[in-house]
Image (cartoon, helix red, strand yellow):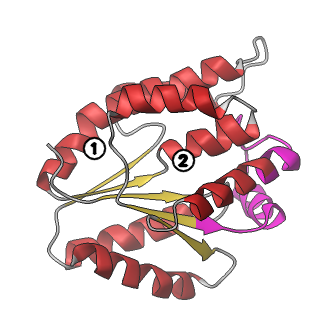
Amino acid sequence: MKQGKFISIEGSEGVGKTTQMAFMCDYLARQGHAVVRTREPGGTSLAERIRQLLLAHDATERMTMDTELLLMFAARAQHIDQVILPGLAQGYVVTDRFTDASYAYQGGGRGVAMSRIKILEDWVQQGLQPDLVILLDAPVSVGRARVGQRGAVDRIESEQAAFFERVRQTYLQRAAHWPDRYHVIDATQEIAAIQQHIVPLLEALCE
């Protein structure tokens, strides 16, 4: 069914994904492409409700790492069926995070075995992978400072610095392993400078 191009933008907290997502979608639309902008976890009504469960603080019950992982993939299954595949049949889909985030957060951050994540990836995605992964990278201290300026933090944002360092390193390891699809951009640069790196990647994808 896949016909269009699938782009994910990845990175830990506070690296500026939302700003660059808007830029990318606007750029592709100006080139005449149909574009679906979405996010994970979320993207559909049901998946957004799962997102609320994942991010909410619960003073009475701790969410286990297996529960967190399974909820992520439950939301992803719905997202793929209802948003991503229909979007790819028409044009471009740009998502704020995809399965790399599960490897980084649940695998690297929580310590879930990568082999278990791979089982869920194969089951839920049936071979679906982004054509382009843009990884916005910044030191953990920079990202956490930016998040702190936004106000209240959610359940995952409130993790300790060591958690986010593991997340960051897992992202970088995956990018190094698949350099043809993954492109790392220094997110400490000015917004315009980051966009100058993104444009050639989009141009190459559009050819």
Return the disc, 1 or 2, that comes first in the chain's sequence: 1
**Mark 1: amino acid:** Ile
State the residue in front, 28 or 102: 102
Who is closer to the viewer here, 139 or 149? 139
Q: In the rendered view, would you say 88 is above or below 17?
A: above
Foreground disc of the pair 1, 2? 2
**In terms of image quadrants, where is residue 37?**
bottom left
| Residue 153 rendering spot, x and y as whole percentages | 72, 44
| Residue 181 sits above or below residue 88 on the image | below
Q: Which residues are magenta?
A: 136-165
Q: Is residue 84 left or right of residue 52?
A: left
Is residue 53 something that shows in the picture?
Answer: no
Residue drawn at 65 percent across, 45 percent down: 104
Left or right of 118? Residue 15 is: right
Amino acid type at mark 2: Asp
How dense is the environment of label 2, judged by Cα within 10 Å: few (below 14), some, or many (20 and up)? many
**Who's the residue at 32% across and 43% down the image?**
128
Badge 1 element: helix
Q: Is residue 117 left or right of residue 189?
A: left
| Image location of residue 123, percent across then percent down | 39, 25
Quarter of the C terminus within the rendering: bottom left
Q: Quick one: which residue is furthest to the top in this view?
A: 60
In x, y percent, where is residue 46?
A: 37, 25
Q: Is residue 182 visible?
A: yes
Which quadrant would the N terminus be assigned to in this image?
top left
In the foreground, 119 or 183 = 119
- Residue 151 covered by magenta stretch: yes
**Disc 1 designates what residue?**
84
Residue 8, compared with residue 65, is above or below; it is below
Name the residue beneath numbered marker 2: 100
**Is 8 contained in the magenta span?**
no
